[in-house]
Image: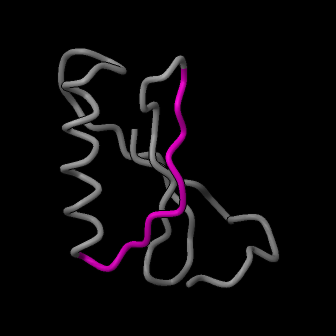
Amino acid sequence: MAEPKTSKNRFHIDIRVAGPGFRSAESEKRLRAKEAELLALGATQVRDEYYDDQLGHIVMLDPEGNEFCVG
């Protein structure tokens, strides 16, 4: 498990997953597929962020502990 964040990120990356149906069941499938790909590359899932009961984005950490979002 990652250590608690002690300082602000120098920069923050948001990865946008392309496709129709923003915040829909289809977009959640695309986000989960991208999450699985990133986990296989060494990322860590931190939390899911929901808006009106739809997955908006996933907060993740790269292998060095830098936070980024997939949305």
**Total residue callouts:** 0
Residues shaded magenta: 41-51
Q: Quadrant of the N terminus?
A: bottom right
Q: Is residue 2 above or below residue 21?
A: below
- Identity of the residue drawn at 52% across and 32% down: 50
Q: Magenta span: helix, strand or loop, mainly?
A: strand
Q: Residue at x 38, y 73 (%)?
A: 43
Q: What is the x, y in percent for residue 36?
A: 23, 61
Residue 5 is left or right of residue 16, and the answer is: right
Residue 53 versus residue 45 in the image, above or below: above
Residue at left offset 24%, top offset 15%:
21
Image quarter of residue 39: bottom left
Q: Which of 6 and 24 lies nearest the eye of the viewer?
A: 24
Please provide percent x and percent y for residue 42: 32, 80
Between residue 12 and residue 39, name the one nearer to us: 39
13, 55: nearer the viewer: 55
Q: Give residue 52's position: percent from left, percent from top.
A: 53, 17
Does the stretch in magenta take in 36?
A: no
